[in-house]
């Protein structure tokens, strides 16, 4: 692939009209992954390519913001339909993961850290809830039952094991010599 000013040249990308924004962005990201693996693409360039503009819009354009707002949907589309992940960087833009190592060392680690954080928040929040303080009324019966049975069982399962420890990424080995 030819490069302009040291950046990948995506001018040969063919925009496909009449698809949703998330599918359009995902389609371009897959194209970029194939032609420049590992290269981040700025949000304005993504807008330029998916809308077939002659040049990119400003970084603070409504269109670039629309892509930022749809990143979760684009990520889900890439995972479900293309078998790859999506990495984001506020300054550099977005890119698809290129292989299992890339996916595991970036997106999987981040997901594990987020899950561990969510687990900690769930347990801490549960510790603040006293089921005896939930009224024994028909209105709150289902909530009280859920807290006493389902939530208690989940908290016990995720607190009693090394669940959180298993989510930590592997420690980097020190250089020897």
Image: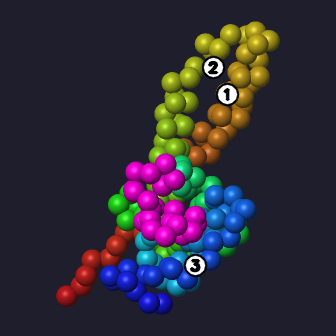
Screen quadrant of the C terminus = bottom left
Q: Secondary structure at mark 3?
A: loop
As drawn, the label of residue 13 is 3
On whether residue 41 falls in the magenta region, the answer is: no
Q: Which residue is mark 2?
A: 131
Asked whether disc 2 touches disc 1, contact meaning CB atoms under 8 Å apart, the reply is yes
Q: Secondary structure at mark 2?
A: helix
Q: CA distance from mark 2 to mark 1?
A: 7 Å
Is residue 120 shown above or below 53?
A: above
Whether residue 150 is visible here, answered yes or no, is yes
Q: Is residue 37 left or right of residue 6?
A: right
Q: Is residue 57 left or right of residue 108?
A: left
Q: Residue at (32%, 82%) from the top-left corner?
A: 5
Q: Which residue is mark 1?
A: 147
Front one among 24 and 143: 24
Which of the two discs, 3 and 2, labels the residue nearer the N terminus?
Answer: 3
Residues in magenta, as a range: 42-65
């Amino acid at each position: 692939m030819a490069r302009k000013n040291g950046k990948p040249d995506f001018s040969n990308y063919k925009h496909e009209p009449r698809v949703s924004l998330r599918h359009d962005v995902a389609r371009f990201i897959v194209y970029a992954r194939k032609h420049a693996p590992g290269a981040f693409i700025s949000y304005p360039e993504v807008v330029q390519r998916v809308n077939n503009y002659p040049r990119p819009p400003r970084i603070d354009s409504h269109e670039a913001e629309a892509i930022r707002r749809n990143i979760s949907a684009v990520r889900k589309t890439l995972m479900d339909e293309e078998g790859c992940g999506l990495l984001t960087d506020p300054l550099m833009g977005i890119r698809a993961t290129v292989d299992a190592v890339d996916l595991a060392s970036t997106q999987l680690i981040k997901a594990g850290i987020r899950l561990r954080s969510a687990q900690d928040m769930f347990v801490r929040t549960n510790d603040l809830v006293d089921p005896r303080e939930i009224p024994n009324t028909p209105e709150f019966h289902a909530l009280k039952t859920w807290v006493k049975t389902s939530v208690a069982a989940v908290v016990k399962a995720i607190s009693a094991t090394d669940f959180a420890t298993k989510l930590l990424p592997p420690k980097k080995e020190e250089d020897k010599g």
